[in-house]
Amino acid sequence: MSRSSSVTPRFRPRRSTRTSVSPSCARCVGSRTRGPEALIRLASVGDPAHPPCVLVEAAHAKLNLSLAITGRRADGFHELVSLVVSVSLADHLALHLGQPLGLTCDNPSLPVDGTNLVLQAAAAYVRRRPGAVVGRFHLAKKIPHGAGLGGGSSDAAAALRLLDRASGDPLGAEVLEALAAEVGSDCPFFVRSQAAIMRGRGERLEILPPAARAALAGRKVVLVKPPFGVPTPEAYALLAKAGKYRAAAPVEAELAAWIARPLADPSPLGNDLAVPVFAKYLALPTGLASFCLTTGTAWRMTGSGSACFSFVTDPFEHARLREDVRRAWGAGSWVGEAVISG
């Protein structure tokens, strides 16, 4: 398999949703134009006839259009260089003000205790700002778990944005990115969710120049995921066992060349985690080889997997692909569509 570990065909045939919702209460609806301070005052009145005010944020998924691992650090993390974009696929996180800090979720398989990144992010925010206004979070999941799409990290960043909105005196994106780095390596990206080059262990971000972002914005992708996920630590452990890291200088040169010509497809820059992951999880490359025949496009893995993606154009045989995915990976597989954001 080539370095890029994409599966190529043999032949060819703003973003974040932000709402302040308490629709049954005229006082709450009327207060929305007065900002979060008014909502917080209403939530603290204690009027049993007044429903808790709710703030909502969309937590968008990400795609690693390229992912190069350039070495292992003394702290156990890996150095990476990755071209990352956000897409329209999103969870939604609500913060119910005036209620005790906690978390509920519409997916019963996900933990709602302190192991969930939403509550870890809330804890980081409260450490930074003791006495911060908190509440009960409710998470509506759309991003598949264990897919390499960054759902958990994006949810954590959404929690930080919600708490910052509720404060009435926002800390701002840069401070939130620093707090996000305490929660997870790729969490800082989701604070702004702007197309960027990610470096370090994921916490160092370079926002792409406008021309490069414009070249990616609006492109359609189709996403597929088998019933199983690939734990991120396992993917990195498989790579570490092989010991095959890339030199940083050529990676940076390839990225610079793409930025100079952003209309080119960046995916051939490769995903270094795909090689060891595909070697262990043979259902992935086998399935993708079949999907190539359906879409006539190349398929790549995002992040540590197990989700994979392909750029598509209309007309596109959605029903046939869904059937192919079910045939290859079974009834527990997933197919989705998304659009890249700028």
Image (spheres, rainbow, N blue to C red):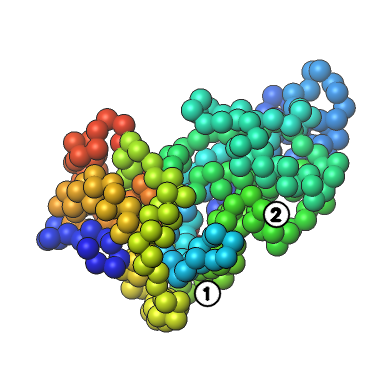
Q: Secondary structure at mark 2?
A: helix
Q: Is residue 54 above or below residue 86?
A: above
Residue in the foreground of this view, choosing between 92 and 253: 253
Image quarter of residue 216: bottom left
> Percent position (x, y) of residue 34?
80, 44
Q: Within 10 angstroms of label 1, few (less than 14), some, or many (20 or more) residues? A: few
Contact, CB < 8 Å: mark 2 with mark 1?
no
Task: Measure the alpha-carbon separation of dots 2 and 1.
Answer: 25 Å
Image quarter of residue 167: top right
Q: Within 10 angstroms of label 2, few (less than 14), some, or many (20 or more) residues? A: many
Residue in the foreground of this view, choosing between 280 and 169: 280
Q: Is residue 138 above or below residue 335?
A: above
Type of amino acid under label 2: Leu
Compared across the picture, whether 192 is left or right of 279 comes to right
Q: Is residue 270 above or below residue 19?
A: below
Quadrant holding the N terminus: bottom left
- Identify the residue position indicated by label 2 in the image: 179
> Percent position (x, y) of residue 218?
41, 59
- Identify the residue position indicated by label 1 in the image: 209
Nearer the viewer's eye, disc 2 or disc 1?
Answer: 2
- Residue at 40 percent of width and 69 percent of height: 245
| Residue lying furthest top | 48
> Percent position (x, y) of residue 238?
38, 55
Q: Secondary structure at mark 1?
A: loop
- Residue at 43 percent of width and 45 percent of height: 231
Instruction: Of the two numbered discs 2 and 1 on the same chain, state the one appearing first in sequence.
Output: 2
- Residue at 63 percent of width and 40 percent of height: 118
Q: Is residue 330 above or below residue 79?
A: above
The label number, if any, that marks residue 15 in the structure image: none
